[in-house]
Image (spheres, rainbow, N blue to C red):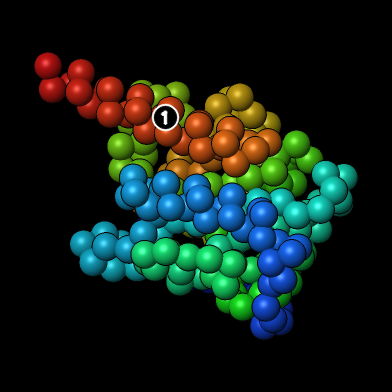
Amino acid sequence: MGAEGVVKFRAEHERADLPAQRYGELGCKLVAWREIMAMALLVGQDPLRYGGAGYGNVSGRIGPPGAPRGARSMLITGTQTSGLAHIGLGHLCVVERYDYERNWVRSHGPVEPSSESMTHGAIYDLTPAIRFVLHAHSPIIWRRARELHVPVTDPHVAYGTPEMAREIQRLYTASALSETRIAAMGGHEDGVIVFGESAERAGQVLLAYLARGYELTCRARH
């Protein structure tokens, strides 16, 4: 398993404030779901998990659905922000473009983009209908992925890499990912990623599978 929270792509990043009048509404949606995920320990930082590194991130699409692949810009939590108790617009950035072949991202904002930006971009490239992506860490879902019928990425593929971006796209075509809207990242301990046409839909998928995972655990004890 690779080191958690380490950016593996080359980022061309311009430090700049994000105007609230443009990004405030979307930013508050992301902050709200990030708060819910933090309460459920799906995002955060724990000295006993992943070598003490932060984990989890969220993003939402910006702009029209019809933008070309590789340019489906997103507002995303910044790298090394997962361990913060609370976040705001100052902990988000805009990823404008991304290129798997070049392993490159262009972004701007007060912080640099999440280490999972390439994977988020790959999901947005699947279909213009996808507008939100939530990346959580859930041992319950990850360890019971097969029982929950959750598609799983190749365990040899590391997170935050061009290979992971391609693996997500492969799963979408070759498995039930287009229907489940959730995948477990086989080579990324406890890593789970969900998506939807709205933040509410993506969040509902995540919480529904979390509940099913706990239900299976309860049954196994009896």
Return the residue nearer the eye: 76 or 188.
Answer: 76
Residue 97, placed above or below residue 33: below
Return the residue nearer the eye: 97 or 200.
Answer: 200
Residue 144, placed above or below residue 169: above
Residue placed furthest toward the front: 21
Residue 91 position in % (x across, y down): 54, 70
Neighbourhood count class around disc 1 (C-alpha, 10 Å): few under 14, some 14–19, many 20 upward: some
Residue placed furthest toward the left: 222
Q: Tell me if residue 170 can be seen.
A: no
Q: Quadrant of the C terminus?
A: top left
Q: Tell me if residue 201 can be seen.
A: yes
Residue 203 position in % (x across, y down): 51, 38
Q: Quadrant of residue 175?
A: top right
* Residue shown at the point (58%, 76%) measured from the top left: 111
* Residue shown at the point (35%, 24%) measured from the top left: 212
Q: Quadrant of the N terminus?
A: bottom left
Residue at which label 1 appears: 209
* Residue shown at the point (65%, 38%) measured from the top left: 198
Amino acid bearing label 1: Tyr
Residue 149 position in % (x across, y down): 44, 24
Circle 1 SS class = helix
* Residue shown at the point (46%, 36%) measured from the top left: 206
Q: Quadrant of residue 168?
A: top right
Residue 201 position in % (x across, y down): 58, 33
Residue 28, placed above or below residue 217: below
Q: How many marks?
A: 1
